[in-house]
Image: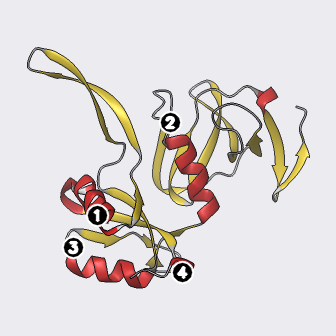
């Protein structure tokens, strides 16, 4: 059984595009997991259908203790930890960062823009908190992407999600967890 006090978010690589199958298995075990999803329109035969599919195949986030996850991993051959290049250890995502990422990714908004790169680093822009609307309380970096001003929430090292356009009046500048300026 898992010890909740040692639970952390781990980034998991799932081979053979079996991330949905693994998520279903983890759900039966009572282990919290998350797959960023989006809607796509496909033509099946003569019908247009709207499907909810993973944004990035082979990626799953799992909230568990390392020991419990190791036990599950020993039973599931297509599950691998994503390794942090700097430490050569399994990648652990801070709880607050994961909560903010899920708050945006769970909206399935068609204007969300995912950014994937093994060397992804946000170095430009201000750290902000959204004051109102569906993303209220989410913190991220304020950047211009594809001509729009957006708030980008990243999972250090490999993935980020950018909101749809966010007007500056809905933002407050944050520095090391403290509000610096709520007026732009």
Mark 3 or 1, nearer chain start: 1
Mark 4 — residue? 6
Question: Which residue in the protein does label 2 denote?
Answer: 107
Q: Quadrant of residue 59?
A: bottom left
Q: Residues within 10 Å of mark 1 (few under 14, many from 20)?
A: few
For the point 22% across and 22% down, which residue is it?
Answer: 49
Q: Earlier in the sequence, mark 2 or mark 4?
A: 4
Determine crowd level at label 4: few under 14, some 14-19, many 20+ residues with C-alpha closer than 10 A.
few
Secondary structure found at label 1: helix
Task: Tell me the quarter of the picture where residue 25 sits.
Answer: bottom left
The x and y percentages for residue 52 are 31, 36
Q: CA distance from mark 1 to mark 4?
A: 20 Å
Q: Which residue is mark 1?
A: 28
Quadrant of the drawing holding the N terminus: bottom left
Q: CA distance from mark 3 to mark 1?
A: 14 Å
Question: Pointer 3 and pointer 2: residues touching (CB < 8 Å)?
Answer: no
Tag 3 and tag 1, C-beta contact below 8 Å: no
Q: Which residue is mark 3?
A: 76
């Amino acid at each position: 059984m898992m010890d909740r006090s040692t639970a952390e978010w781990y980034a998991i690589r799932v081979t053979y595009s079996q991330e949905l199958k693994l998520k279903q298995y983890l759900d039966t075990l009572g282990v919290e997991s998350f797959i960023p999803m989006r809607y796509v329109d496909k033509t099946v035969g003569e019908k247009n259908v709207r499907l909810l599919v993973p944004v990035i195949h082979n990626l799953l986030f799992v909230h568990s203790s390392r020991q419990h996850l190791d036990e599950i991993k020993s039973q599931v051959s297509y599950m691998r930890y994503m390794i942090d290049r700097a430490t050569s250890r399994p990648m652990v995502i801070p709880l607050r960062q994961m909560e903010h990422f899920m708050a945006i990714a769970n909206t399935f908004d068609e204007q969300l823009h995912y950014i994937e790169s093994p060397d992804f680093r946000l170095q430009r822009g201000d750290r902000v908190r959204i004051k109102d609307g569906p993303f209220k309380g989410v913190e991220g970096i304020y950047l211009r992407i594809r001509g729009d001003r957006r708030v980008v929430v990243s999972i250090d090292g490999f993935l980020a999600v950018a909101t749809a356009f966010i007007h500056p009046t809905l933002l407050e500048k944050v520095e090391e967890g403290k509000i610096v300026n709520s007026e732009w």
